[in-house]
Amino acid sequence: MNESPNNHGHVGRNGRIGPNGAQRGAEGADRAPVDELAAAPDEHDPVRAAELHLVDALLASLSAEAVDEREARIRRVMDAVDDGPATPGRPTRSRRWPPLVAVAACLMAACMLFWLQFSPESRASEVLLEIGRVSLEKIDRVYRFRRVMPSSGESDQHEGRLYLRGCQGFVIVCGDVVLGRNTDEFWFVAPDGPVVVADNFEWLVGHSERERLELELLNVLSIDSRSLPLVQLSSAVELMQHDYDVTLDEDTRHGKRVDVLVGALRDKAADLPDTIRLWSDKDSRIIERAELRWGRKLDRPQAGAIVLELMAAERVPVDWYEHQAHHPGDQPLRRITSGS
Amino acid sequence: MPDARRLFEALVREHGDMLTVFLKSVLRNPSDVDDLFQETMVVAWRRLDDFDETRAFGPWLRGIAKKLVLAHHRKRAGRACDPAALEQVDLRLAQWSAQPGDTWEEKLRVLRTCVDALPEHYRETVELRYFHQKAVRQVSEVLQVSNAAVKKRLERARSLVLDCIQRKLAPAEVAP
């Protein structure tokens, strides 16, 4: 059989932690404060990270919600099976339609295509796709970044500059602290204290000296475990494609007409912005302004909006998305991994 | 052929949870999980004639899913999927499949045991987050701690659960 016992070479965290060591960790957790437990850094270990994602998925599979999801998935699969080949491995026999029916079907398909091509929904999807493609380009773009509180309509103290390079990196400069991401790591630099580096945004949020960048700001940015922060605009575009009903509108900015994509969150219970608006140049498809707005909910008293405004292009150093570019080099480094 | 369809639906029901967990472990976007779940199952249906009935269905299904996941990561501009990580998830799921029990819930008895063995403040956080599906903010309100503390507890809890699982599953034999 495929699932041979000999395949279990990784068991025991690649041999680094044996049963006794792990036992001590679990017992110690009763007594040691969380910060104390989190203090020991671990090596970067994608295998353990994958196992932690697996634990997350296993735990989620035990919920009642998972049962509903399972039934929905099974139903969709069986519907697809019913619509596809009648038996496995064999294509469905082609039918010979009467010529009149075939002509009618062709006409109907042509009408559908015409309608789809020019329907507002189709146009919005098309624009969103173009914006998504441009947002992935490895070109540095700079945005003014501010958070707007719903009560006053004014920016709070979280105001700064956001640098984006496609889907691969971002840097937020907010006062004297800098939060960033290169392709694989998230990092946090403050003038005092260690440079914190993590390969998962959630871990960084959990461990960085949050009071420096304010707890709520990081919470707003962290949409869900394992997800990228929404300020990585390519992620926001991807989310809009999957989880939002998107419509297309127009607006005037700086004397020219621009497209505005308005995304309304389908599942209001999801921990995501209720609306995402993207203003984009009609020719270049660069996002000139983005507004991510969270609705006020009982469990979300910190609701508000994050607004990004495109600024003039700025040449940034090659290593700008690495933490080393933002501190002198003599600051201690604290690396956070799943085990720390 | 109604019999083939009925048999396949039984296989989908038997292995659906395992496949969902596999996909959730290696994909970030819930929509991608749904899409690749369906794609994997439809490919399995189309290739059912190729399936060697003397072998287990689960690893064959994960084999299809692994190829689709790697192709998905290649197509998308997101972070690449580490093949070693993918293999490790595959191996671990082989161990779960070998656990005694007829249903997925029964096979996850060890997981329940590990959660029950967590220190109180971790256990209640895990139960609220996963079993009662509370958002982090809601958990923080119930427990009267900050969102950061909830996230940190969840991290530590998952880490402790993983260590516990590794201890308990290590000697398990893998089912044919």
Image (cartoon, coloured by chain):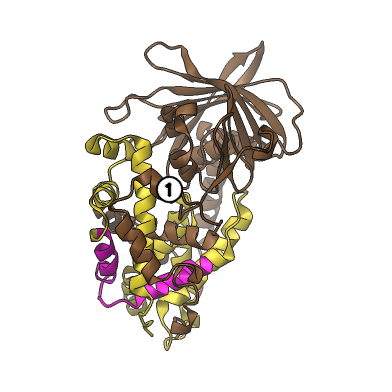
Label 1: chain letter: A
Whether A98 is among the magenta residues is no
Vertical placement of residue A337 versus B142, above or below: below
- For this orientation, the residue located farthest to the bottom is B54
Give how far across and how far down residue A79 sits, in percent: 37, 61
Q: Callout 1, which amino acid? A: Ala
Vertical placement of residue B22 versus A329, above or below: below
Vertical placement of residue A19 versus A26, above or below: below
Give how far across and how far down residue A312 sits, in percent: 71, 20
Q: Residue at x 66, y 29 (%)?
A: A286
Report the predominant secondary structure element of the magenta stretch. helix
Give chain A's shade.
brown
B54 left or right, relative to A173: left
Give how far across and how far down residue A160 sits, in percent: 58, 21
Q: Is residue A119 visible?
A: yes
Give how far across and how far down residue A331 sits, in percent: 62, 37
Residue under circle 1? A38
Q: Residue at x 38, y 71 (%)?
A: A19
- Name which quarter of the figure residue A176 lies in: top right
- Chain with colour yellow in the figure: B
A79 left or right, relative to B67: left
* Circle 1 crowding by C-alpha within 10 Å: few under 14, some 14–19, many from 20: many
- Name which quarter of the figure residue A18 lies in: bottom left
The magenta stretch is B86-115
Total numbered circles:
1
Whether B87 is among the magenta residues is yes
B25 left or right, relative to A71: right
